[in-house]
Amino acid sequence: GAGVSQSPRYKVAKRGQDVALRCDPISGHVSLFWYQQALGQGPEFLTYFQNEAQLDKSGLPSDRFFAERPEGSVSTLKIQRTQQEDSAVYLCASSLTRTSGSRDEQYFGPGTRLTVT
Amino acid sequence: KQEVTQIPAALSVPEGENLVLNCSFTDSAIYNLQWFRQDPGKGLTSLLLIQSSQREQTSGRLNASLDKSSGRSTLYIAASQPGDSATYLCAVPKYNFNKFYFGSGTKLNVKP
């Protein structure tokens, strides 16, 4: 079946603009994660959803970042008043369940590369 | 907070060599550890997932081991090929699976 998809793949925003990044997880996957990846670094956790509930948003760097998953499927990461330090690749991942000790692998989308000028 | 470290940061080897990538983590109370591959401009592809009760997991030329007590995992790649060139990342979940911690990766270049 289809994997995780993200759109747009590339986004250039002027400083101060608002942006919205979309993630379509694998159908039926309960868990959805957003990560921020700077050049040459590993992904840094931003936020986690279990179905429509946002259970962890401890990684969001400021109150300019907001994420939602209203129907428990598609998710949107919104960044308000973008700053240059927001330039990064934003990755979305989904997994089937959230059970400890499970063989629950994360499946990643291709990412959205955000450049703030 | 869990800290995940990967050494070396970069590695260049001639084709055909066997090689080992290292991943260490500070909190040994993990449920599993996952190895990923990332090609330039692409997302992450899962390679292997090792449960905390396992010591090894194999897929083709890849073998991953896990030593929880010492906080280490290794990814062994046999008979490396130019197509193996990519960045390899390891990740461990928080106890409640609400968050995953990644290393910064090892960038591998296999020369023909």
Image (spheres, rainbow, N blue to C red):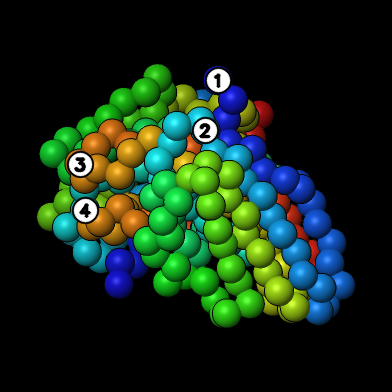
Would residue B17 be visible to someone looking at this image? no
- Asked if badge 2 and badge 3 are on a common chain, one would say yes
Residue B30's disc number: 4
Q: Residue at x 76, y 48 (%)?
A: A8
Q: Residue at x 64, y 38 (%)?
A: A5
- Asked if badge 4 and badge 2 are on a common chain, one would say no
Which quarter of the image is occupied by the C terminus of chain A? bottom right
Mark 3 — residue?
A: A101
**Mark 3 vs 1, N-terminal side:** 1
Place residue B82 in its image quadrant.
top right
Q: Label 1 sits on what residue type? A: Gly
Q: Position of residue A46 (x, y in %)?
A: 50, 64
Q: Position of residue A47 (x, y in %)?
A: 47, 62
Does B62 sit above or below residue B28? above
Would residue A115 be visible to someone looking at this image? yes
Report the chain holding disc 2: A
**Mark 2 vs 3, N-terminal side:** 2
Gap between marks 2 and 3, in whole Å? Answer: 21 Å
Q: Position of residue A91 (x, y in %)?
A: 59, 51
- Report the side of B10 relative to A50 (left or right): right
Q: Label 2 sits on what residue type? A: Ile
Gap between marks 4 and 2, in whole Å? Answer: 26 Å
Report the chain holding disc 1: A
